[in-house]
Amino acid sequence: SQTIHQWPATLVQPVGSPLSLECTVEGTSNPNLYWYRQAAGRGLQLLFYSVGIGQISSEVPQNLSASRPQDRQFILSSKKLLLSDSGFYLCAWSSIGELFFGEGSRLTVL
Amino acid sequence: EDQVTQSPEALRLQEGESSSLNCSYTVSGLRGLFWYRQDPGKGPEFLFTLYSAGEEKEKERLKATLTKKESFLHITAPKPEDSATYLCAVQAWRAGSARQLTFGSGTQLTVLP
């Protein structure tokens, strides 16, 4: 069966520091991969998606970037965090329609 | 632009008190409507996919239905463990293979013992 792992689960970082969140999927090949951000009381906002290695599409202009160095690995990064980057980040994968999410990463920027 | 509106924002029920959550949507060509359950501090858990008006799906105490404008998630005789936020999302028929979903803000359900 397919599984998705996301880490770290929680992260507290100072403003201006770098960020790296990682996500890996097991049990499937060539999945579509996604990074979402969820703010309190709001829906999930799509940040990036990828249909293959090295193929990244950005949905909103922001301080973040994404990379897909391997088929089942998706990384969310920032060179310098802003206060507004705080939130709950979710990685997800899909094949035929439904999205399957990881456990999420809670980022607090101080 | 695809839009999803969920109501109510929050719902408190007594154990055993059945009710329904609403998801109204606007999309240019519905490919699928999805329901998820999300527990605090966790990622959303997939529940159902509905593809066409009139379709229904059930899982334990939950039943999802779909019309051309909205979907309902019916909860029959809920238990405290059904407490969670329920998210609705739609996917449109569009070119490209990313299959992006548009999510609503969710309904926070609390079931009291």
Image (cartoon, rainbow, N blue to C red):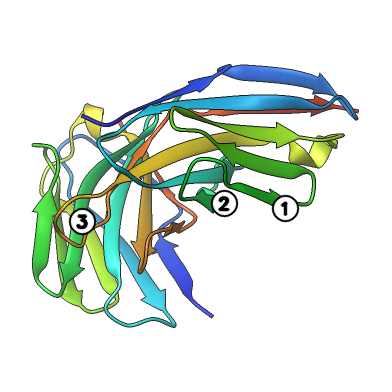
Q: Which residue is mark 2?
A: B48
* Residue B12 percent location from the top left of the image: 74, 18
| Front disc: 2 or 3 | 2
Regarding residue A107, the answer to whether it shows in the image is no
Amino acid type of the residue that numbered disc 2 sits on in the rendered structure: Phe
Q: Is residue B100 above or below residue A41?
A: below
Q: Which residue is mark 1?
A: B59
Query: Considering the numbered disc 3 on the image, is that residue within a helix, a strand or a loop?
Result: strand
User: Which quadrant holds residue A100?
Assistant: bottom left
Do callouts 3 and 1 mark residues in contact (Cβ within 8 Å)?
A: no
Asked whether B62 or A78 is in front, the reply is: B62
Asked whether B29 or B46 is in front, the reply is: B29
**Numbered badge on residue A8:** none
Amino acid type of the residue that numbered disc 1 sits on in the rendered structure: Lys
* Residue B72 percent location from the top left of the image: 60, 31
Asked whether B13 or A73 is in front, the reply is: B13
Query: Considering the numbered disc 1 on the image, is that residue within a helix, a strand or a loop?
Result: strand
Asked if badges 2 and 3 are on one and the same chain, I answer no
* Residue A43 percent location from the top left of the image: 39, 31
Residue at the image position 28 percent from the left and 63 percent from the top: A33
Q: Which residue is mark 3?
A: A49
Query: Considering the numbered disc 2 on the image, is that residue within a helix, a strand or a loop?
Result: strand
Residue at the image position 34 percent from the left and 65 percent from the top: A23
Q: Is residue B82 above or below residue A77?
A: above
Do callouts 2 and 1 mark residues in contact (Cβ within 8 Å)?
A: yes
- Indicate which disc, 2 or 1, sits on the residue closer to the N terminus: 2
Regarding residue A61, the answer to whether it shows in the image is yes
> Marks 2/1: CA distance?
8 Å
Few, some or many residues within 10 Å of mark 3 (<14, 14–19, 20+): many
